[in-house]
Image: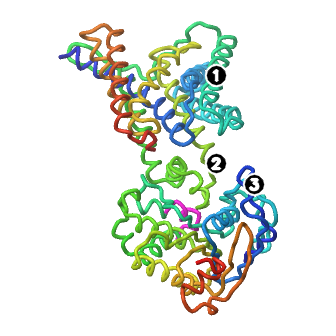
Amino acid sequence: MEAILVAVLNGLVVGASIALVASGLALLFGVLEILNLAQGDYFMLGGYVLWLSLTHGQSFWVGAAAAAVVVGVAGGLVLMIMLRPLRHRPTGLILLATLALSLILEQLATSTFGGDTKSIHPPIAGVLAVGTKNYPVYDLVIVAVAAAILLGGFLFLRYAKYGIWLRAVAQNHEMASVLGVPVSRVYMLAFIISSALAGVAGSLLVPLTGVYPTVGLDITVSSFIVVIAGGLGNFRGAALIAVVLGVVQSVGAIWVRAQAVQIIVFALVILLLIVRSRRQSVLIRL
Amino acid sequence: MLELQELHSFYGRSHVVQGVSLSVGAGEAVGLVGRNGVGKTTTLKSIMGLVPQTSGRILFKDKDLRSSATHARAGRGLGFVPDERAVFPRMTVEENIRIGAFLQPGPQQAGCLATAYELFPVLGRRRNQAAGTLSGGEQKMLSLARGLALKPDLLLVDEPSEGLMPINVDLISRALQQAAATGMSILVVDASFELLRSVCGRLYVMEQGLITGEHKLSEFSTPADLVKTYLRGQA
């Protein structure tokens, strides 16, 4: 029982970080129909921004905020500038462009920071007793912060002016512009929020995983599974499925080998896609 | 308020609008009639900036709009209600209205909602319902209410009565009449004689991408007179 509880908590931590990255992916797809293969690299950049902030004497939380801002603005602008000429071109071209961006960022990180893992201590050292085991408080803080960010994102999309405009543009950008919505500005916001979510997730996870140039690879794969399973463009669906995926993988690993759990998850996603395509359900539901 | 001078619009190689010139005065309601496919909708879309290839001049409040983006034209006081059910289906009725209302100063935003619900009370009763679940007629009402509630200086309305039951056509005619009475300029494309007669003072006839006639509504006493005019006796 104790092992299951710890596995659930571990799953929540993994799920929360995947949720942040995946909800950014879902948002970008919902508004612009762009699948960003460099999302995991923005996660990696978030980690490096935090590491740099700490080496320059800033506090952990200032570094995490800087990761969100720097990756959000710089990453968002790079994506926008790179993809603007490719609007209305085949989706394959856009995918290839984001893949190229991903490779460039990984090489840049390797040549700038080296291929070694940079480790950081958690900002909160305390532990919580779970039965006979001690569970790090910081891990729970990750879940709480991620939940707060995602709840904030949900409320923003539901009630804020730009949140409502993001949903309107996702559904019908031409009609939104007829009503006076500055569509280009909304596109820019989608790029920035999507990148910032990956950046902040990367910074939060550094104390657990360390940061190295390919740290975002695994989370990219998991995020794509989540976004596909949750419904492309579905912000809420992505967040929910991410948490479920994290918990299932973590708890499943108690009885089955981790690789086998991964295979089962992939099989379930394929099954879900088959069912969904037969029901002709709408994929974009921002 | 609006003056089109030699407007040409293209979809690829197709030359749809071939030199349209027309005007709508301040506080005036004008109709635009013609057979299907003569370029009426394209004319309205060109004014709104939704047709990428255009030439000629689109003067709105004495400024040429051709270099302005669609949202900037809306910001200058131009409204457009398209013929298709142009609602945001997965957003509520209230959210559909708020999209445009956000551009109004704070205190006037609530006024937009009140205006829309006053024009079409059924929308008020369904304010929390997803717009995509409304009936076809209700979606048309929402689209028109959203356009009118923003109180643009000039509202372009495309086929508001198309596919509606007579009772809904009456509601829509009354809403446009009320808007015209408040001084809003209106350019409406429609085939309903009753709607045009109740809203507009004059109308333009369009054929094959060109304006071929200008008439006062008082010249027509029956729907057949109007049809004969724009079908040139082929009705």
Q: Which mark is residue A231?
A: none
Q: Secondary structure at mark 2?
A: helix
Name the kind of residue labelled 2 in the image: Arg
Q: CA distance from mark 2 to mark 3?
A: 23 Å
In the image, which residues are magenta? B98-107
Q: CA distance from mark 1 to mark 2?
A: 33 Å
Looking at the image, residue B210 lies above or below residue B233: above
Residue at position x 17%, y 17% in the image: A1
Q: Secondary structure at mark 3?
A: strand
Image position, residue A82 (x, y; %)? 70, 32
User: Which residue position is annotated with label 2?
Assistant: A185
Are the numbered discs 1 and 3 placed on the same chain, yes or no? no
User: Which residue position is annotated with label 1?
Assistant: A56
Q: Nearer the viewer, mark 1 or mark 3?
A: 3
Image position, residue B122 (x, y; %)? 36, 72
User: Which residue position is annotated with label 3?
Assistant: B53
**Would you call the spot at circle 1 few (<14 residues within 10 Å), some (14-19), or many (20 or more)?**
few
Say which quarter of the image contains residue A245: top left
